[in-house]
Image (spheres, coloured by chain):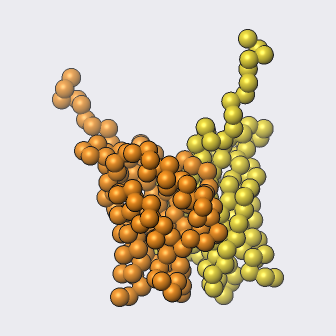
Chain colours: A yellow, B orange
Amino acid sequence: MDDRAAVLEANDAFYRAFTRRDLTGMRDVWAGTPSDVCIHPGWEIQRGWHAIRSAWAKIFMGGMEMRFELGEVTVDVWGDVARIVLVENIWSGREFIGRVAATKLLLRTPAGWRVTLHHGSPIAQEAQEPEPDLSDMN
Amino acid sequence: MDDRAAVLEANDAFYRAFTRRDLTGMRDVWAGTPSDVCIHPGWEIQRGWHAIRSAWAKIFMGGMEMRFELGEVTVDVWGDVARIVLVENIWSGREFIGRVAATKLLLRTPAGWRVTLHHGSPIAQEAQEPEPDLSDMN
C-alpha cells in the first residue's frame, strides 16, 4: 500500500473509533507518545496520551451520537511525517451539528502510520450556509 | 543555529509580521506553495499562498491592533518537518481579547524554515479564566 493510502486508512480508523466511541480503537490510532497533541474545538491543548485519553473518555461518555461526512480532504507526506487537512461535517442522527476544520499529523512507525496531532476548530455558522429563506411563510 | 532555535526564530518573525500588519513580512515567513494551509479561528480552510495572502490582507485591513503573549510553546522536529504548538494570549491595548490554540508546521527549505500550516482555534471563554469574584461588592 502506498503512503497516501496508508495515511487515509489511519484517518478512517480514527473516525471509525470516534463514531463508535471506541477508546481502544482510538488508542490504537495514536502514536501514544508524550509529544502527542490533541485540540478539540474550543478546548485547552491536551498534551501526551494520558491527557488525550481522558479527553476522549469525556467526549465518549458525553453520549452524543455523531456521524462524520469528510470533505476537502488533502494528504501531504514529507518523509516520515504526513499531514491530513479536512472538513468534518458532523451529524447526529438527522440533525446537522456543524462543521469543523481539522488538521492531523501522522508519524511513520514500525507499526504503521500513527496520529501525533489532531486539531479541530469550529467553522463559524455564518460561513456555513445561508439562512433558509422564510419569506414565503410571512 | 540549531533547528529548534531556527524554528522559534521563524515563529517570532510570524508574530512580528502579524503585530505590525506587515504583509511582506508575513509572505517571507511562509513556504509559499500550493499546499500551504491557513485556518484562522472560525474561518474556512485557506489553501495555497494566494488564498492565504488574501485572508491576511483582510485581517490586516480590519485594523485591530493586536499584541500576542505566547504561552505553552513546544517545538518538535522530525527530519525536515517541524511542529510548533502554543497558546496565543491576545491583547488589544490594555483589553484582553482572548486565547487561541495554534498549531504550526514548518518545512526546512534552502532559505531556512518556512511555515506551511497555521491553524488557530479559539479556546472557549469558560476554559479561560474564572469569573471575577464579585461577592465583596454585594
Report x, y in % for residue A14: 69, 64
Please report the residue visible at 61 percent of the width from the left and 37 percent of the height from the top. Answer: A126
Vertical order, B36 against A3 (above or below): above
The furthest residue to the front: B24
**Spot occupied by residue A77 in the image (x, y as percentages of width and height):** 66, 78
Residue sticking out furthest to the top: A138
Compare residues B63 and A79 and report the one nearer the observer.
B63
Closer to the camera, B121 or A63?
B121
Can see residue A66? no
Residue at x 56%, y 71% (from the top left corner): B32
Image position of B121 (left or right of A126): left
Residue A121: % across, % down: 56, 52
Q: Where does the image place residue B134, in percent across and percent down from the top left?
A: 24, 31
Identify the residue at the far right of this view: A1
For the N terminus of chain A, give its image quadrant.
bottom right
- From the viewer's perspective, tell me whether residue B36 is left or right of residue A21: left
Q: What residue is shown at x 76% (from left), y 52% (from top)?
A: A69
Apparent side of residue A86 relative to residue B101 in the rendered image (left or right): right
Can residue B23 be seen here? The reply is yes
Q: Residue B71 lies in what quarter of the image?
A: bottom left
Q: In the figure, is residue A4 to the left or right of B66?
A: right
Q: Residue at x 42, y 85 (%)?
A: B3
The residue nearer to you, when weighing A10 against A21, is A10
Q: Is residue B134 above or below residue B22?
A: above
Quadrant holding the C terminus of chain A: top right
> In the rendered image of this protein, does residue B65 appear above or below residue A26?
above
In this figure, what is the number of numbered marks?
0
